[in-house]
Amino acid sequence: MSITDSNGDLLAMARGLASNDYSSLDLVQHYLQRIARLDDKLHSYTNVMTERALSEARRADFSRLQGHTLGPLHGIPFGAKDVYDVEGEATTAGSPAFKNRVATRDATAIARLRGAGAILLGKLATHELTHGGVDFGLPWPPARNPWNLDYDPGGSSSGAGVAVASGLCAFALGTDTGGSIRKPAAMCGISGLKPTFGRVSRYGVMLNAASLDHCGPMARTASGCAVVLQAIAGRDTLDSVSAPASVPDYMASIGKGIDGLRIGVVSHFWTEDLPSLPPVREGMGQAIEMLKRIGAKVTDVRLKSIAEYTETKLTIQRFELFALYGQDIRSRRAEFGPKMRNRMDDYALITKEAYLAAKQRQAELTAEMLRSMADIDVLITAGPGPAEPLANVAARSGAPAGDLTLPFNLTGFPAAVTCIGFTEHDLPLSLQVVGKPFAEGTVLRVADAYERATRWHLRHPNVEQKKNYEAASV
């Protein structure tokens, strides 16, 4: 099997390495060559660690020749959103204010992936402090959607979504405060998982909001996300909110099917609260019918409105974001991008009393969602997408009024997205699967079953044939 025969599937790639069809060095060189050839269009990487990756590939191959392998990720190349610390490298979080912030040790998730044999290719683009949105005034140009270079790839893990979808790494690590894994995964046509709050350590990660941030995997398939989650999940004493819950075998859920599984459809999210475009409604209708066809028992579930989750979440996020970076903004304002500066000015006005009231409401909304799931295994709702023109997104001064992804950051429940089709202009559509706390295995099982029953995840953008975008269009 050749590298291209794997079609970007992480498990197929691992089998190719195990059968000596190619080496880790072959894989790393393959990705580095694609990055060199294509990323001047896509802008997914901010730091490519070429020599480091090549050296680690040689070590991985030598270890395999000696009969020592570290599991399915041994020798597999990946990228990490530029919020994860990597020893000896700058962690900027997409902000010029932190361009000289060099890490002295690896983030826990990076260290665990290294321990599993994975090879880091480099750092991936993000919105400033994972919050500033698309901003052409920063030193790094915004990442571009590989399906249409004039469109937004979603954020804030924008580079991660682009790199995985474009075949510039086998998988990526993102972070998610209000949808920042699921949005780019959805808009780039791949799979992405936001695990339960506390399931994956955030130690060594530049945060956005301490009580809402999640670290998680992005890959071509749900099975790829399962393999990566297996390596990075688990208790970490260096992260004060890291959960002690035991880590199951996530791969045991893959290929299991969903016959008899109970699914609750939260249709009002995309039909009433944030009315979607016709392609989304059509895609969701077809996806629900497919889930029924492969054995799921489907019922309707009604939660609180997205507006109610949004108001609570934004109060918490903005208060915590200002607590993290407000002093920096005030003391060295000119070093930050204009969007970030302007947004943070308003956040200084949120009172401690308003924050505490929002935290109380968060607890109530979380309990209410859990009660709604008492008789079902997972919720489904529409995911993000389709993508919008990049220039339109860049022109917005503020954050969106609400998101389909946001409620599940507030409650901290695990949520994944997978592709369910495309618009007539070849922009991906997505389905979101949400589980009970620490039921990532069930979430991945549903996403995997849908992927096995369809072929949407096998469709990839042909970046090689994309024309250069017109700079004047932005």
Image: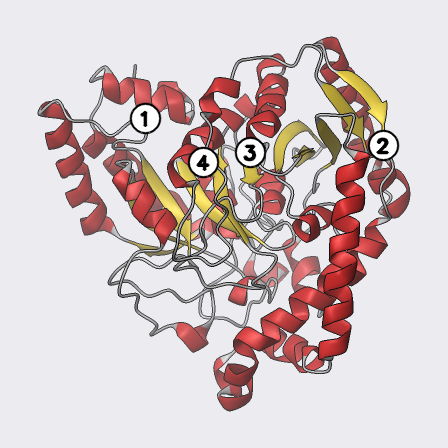
> Which quarter of the rendered picture does the N terminus lie within?
top left
Residue with the mark numbered 2: 301
Q: Secondary structure at mark 1?
A: loop
Q: Secondary structure at mark 4?
A: helix
Return the x and y of residue 46 as percentages of the image width and height: 39, 58
Q: Secondary structure at mark 2?
A: loop
Q: Earlier in the sequence, mark 3 or mark 2?
A: 3
Residue 35 appears left or right of 60? right
Residue depicted at 63% across the width and 19% down the height: 450
Q: CA distance from mark 1 to mark 4?
A: 12 Å
Residue with the mark numbered 1: 72
Q: Secondary structure at mark 3?
A: strand
Q: Residue 163's quadrant in the figure?
A: top left
Q: CA distance from mark 1 to mark 2?
A: 38 Å
Amino acid type at mark 1: Pro
Q: Earlier in the sequence, mark 4 or mark 3?
A: 3
Q: Are marks 4 and 2 in contact (CB under 8 Å)?
A: no
Q: Earlier in the sequence, mark 3 or mark 1?
A: 1
